Image: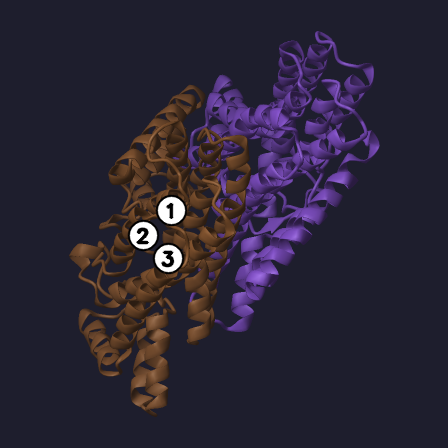
Chain colours: A purple, B brown
Amino acid sequence: MDGRVAEEVRHFLTDFLERRRRDCADMDAEFTETVVDRLTRFTLDGGKRLRPLFAWWGWRAAGGADQGPAAGAMLRAAAALELIQTCALVHDDVMDGSALRRGNPAVHVLFGAVHRDGGWFGDPERYGTALAMLTGDLSLAWADDMLEEAGLSPAARTRARGPWRAMRTEMMAGQFLDIHGQARRDDSEITALRADRLKTAAYSVERPLQFGAVIAGAGEGVVAALRGYGEDIGIAFQLRDDLLGVFGAPEATGKPVGDDLREGKRTLLLAIGMRRARERGDAAALAELSAAVGDPGLTGADIETTRALLDRLGARQEVEERIRRLAEQGQQRLKQAPISEAAVRALRRLAVRATERDR
Amino acid sequence: MDGRVAEEVRHFLTDFLERRRRDCADMDAEFTETVVDRLTRFTLDGGKRLRPLFAWWGWRAAGGADQGPAAGAMLRAAAALELIQTCALVHDDVMDGSALRRGNPAVHVLFGAVHRDGGWFGDPERYGTALAMLTGDLSLAWADDMLEEAGLSPAARTRARGPWRAMRTEMMAGQFLDIHGQARRDDSEITALRADRLKTAAYSVERPLQFGAVIAGAGEGVVAALRGYGEDIGIAFQLRDDLLGVFGAPEATGKPVGDDLREGKRTLLLAIGMRRARERGDAAALAELSAAVGDPGLTGADIETTRALLDRLGARQEVEERIRRLAEQGQQRLKQAPISEAAVRALRRLAVRATERDR
């Protein structure tokens, strides 16, 4: 399976969602065609499958088999991570007021448009928000169902619950810190790093690795090495996201240029920019950065100015340098544990994918 | 435990939430004091504990013990239903735009007020919505964790997953039908009944009963009798809600008079009123009802007029009559199965509580 994790994950998601669709169609056709089909399309169209990949390689690093029923159960459990992620993305887009996701209208926008086009009663935006909330809620509940039905052995299931429990709470805590940091205009590096640790490092990398490893029955040394690697790579992953949010090409990211700035995201990139402006006593740069963040009316030219400013302050370079250091340090950690050469190589490739991507 | 189910449920919720609070406090203090504490207060202050009560009496009806470790595990599993309910209520209030819950500001309103009072950055309403979304999401994830940690035997756990899986999806499908029915101004009795069946009958009564019964290892006959009773009582329960939403005393319901009308809820009460107006060819009454539903500007006098109209059309009486018939029919069903006299008596009392309440 090593080379086909993303395909297998998609296959198991398709299978699970088709079975659920049949159950739901017996219950209510309108719900099925509206909410269930939207959830399904969103999940199957989705992304890089990074969380299942990290879970798979946590499993393989801990000696889990590449083939056979246990490997199949592991992949089904890993696929359930994608249903948590559907909830996270659909709900985050509502909370952040993001209109686009992967280059397409966000789920709440799609539902709002159906209401508007139909000339239905009430406020299209409220309807869109409500249906996106339900889509995410359903996906979160189904994530648990899918884990439950994955076919793990009772002992593996019990071990899996620890990281499973932690990662859902950490994802929500990280999202809280994002939202709350925006509201408080908190520009400290410490707060940005707290959110990055929870939302990206723990939820997206460290916990999926631990999840796969404990399902395989890994010892403490292997789990500790994987989690150390996961934390470093996870933060580097988020820092890459910060850079793409400001400097990325919209045709690659599927998001308008400067969306993070308009939405007022308090990223570590920005906190570093502010700190560097303060260190230089550059009050004008500080004021300019402050004014740009969270201004929904930013034009392309404004964003160009902010980009140039983050460049000139050296913030972009500092973040690039941190990514490089974290990626290197993360890989070092793998050497301290009895992990097969093949798994180390695969985790190195995943680290590159997570931290050197352009989308 | 028979006489102290609500107290025991509160005790187990307190215990679970205190342990979670400690874990979260180690992770992030601000998240804990904001989201976790709000979730905890909302859940502990909550309601009638009807869902755990139905689960408990499903267990007892199927021969589950009143005391001992298995009874304790059952109560913990039943308490987890209250965490699903916290998600349902907190999210429903956002979706419906309800400002009040149990006589207090709804969770999204409370969070919005903190933002406004603090003079924080951005839109207080969006912040309130985001934090209420996170509170509900967390509660839904924790419901699964609490079921997992309830201490059920592996076989009982596996049996419990069937109704557990069904009830979460049915709750969301029912809420979808509510929202969608409002948007489509669907005034058919069939649609109203579909929503009632899913959201109240299945989610609130039938599935909790089944959940308790299968945990006890009930045979098919007992489960079928309980589910039949549950469906009848559940619909009667919702019809009582419909009546309270229009005719209830606000000091008892904790909701402003006529809130259901202002929000545009497509209740069975309303559908019956419309049908009776049509049957009489009373176009004026039909137009008046249509105009009243979903008009956020309804005054006290408008609501008085609508009440009088539903009275005059005989809709109120028809609904009262249906509640009576359903409650009676539900109780009859219990007689067809080998259920202890004590459980039948308790279920009769619960049916009365659910269908003859004033709040």
Residue hosting label 1: B61
- Of the numbered discs 1 and 3, the one sitting upstream in the chain is 1
Q: Distance from label 2 to label 3 (Cα)? A: 7 Å
User: Where does residue B316 sit, x and y in percent of width and height?
Assistant: 26, 74
Tell me which chain the residue with mark 3 is part of: B
Find residue B63 and report its image quarter.
top left
* Callout 2 amino acid: Val
Residue hosting label 3: B334
Q: Distance from label 2 to label 1 (Cα)? A: 7 Å
- Of the numbered discs 2 and 1, the one sitting upstream in the chain is 1
* Callout 1 amino acid: Ala
Q: Distance from label 1 to label 3 (Cα)? A: 10 Å
Residue A250, above or below B221:
above
**View extreme (top): residue:** A336
- Of the numbered discs 2 and 3, the one sitting upstream in the chain is 3
Residue shown at the point (25%, 50%) measured from the top left = B102
Residue B83, above or below A233:
below
Residue shown at the point (60%, 26%) measured from the top left = A160
* Callout 3 amino acid: Leu
- The secondary element bearing badge 3 is classed as helix
Q: Do callouts 2 and 1 mark residues in contact (Cβ within 8 Å)?
A: yes
Q: In this view, does B208 lie to the left or right of A336?
A: left
Tell me which chain the residue with mark 1 is part of: B
Residue shown at the point (42%, 25%) measured from the top left = B24
Quarter that holds the N terminus of chain A: top right
User: Where does residue B325 sit, x and y in percent of width and height?
Assistant: 31, 70
Near-viewer residue (B174 or A284): B174
Q: Do callouts 1 and 3 mark residues in contact (Cβ within 8 Å)?
A: yes
- Mark 2 neighbour density, 10 Å: few (under 14) some (14–19) many (20 or more): some
Find residue B27 and report its image quarter.
top left
Residue hosting label 2: B344
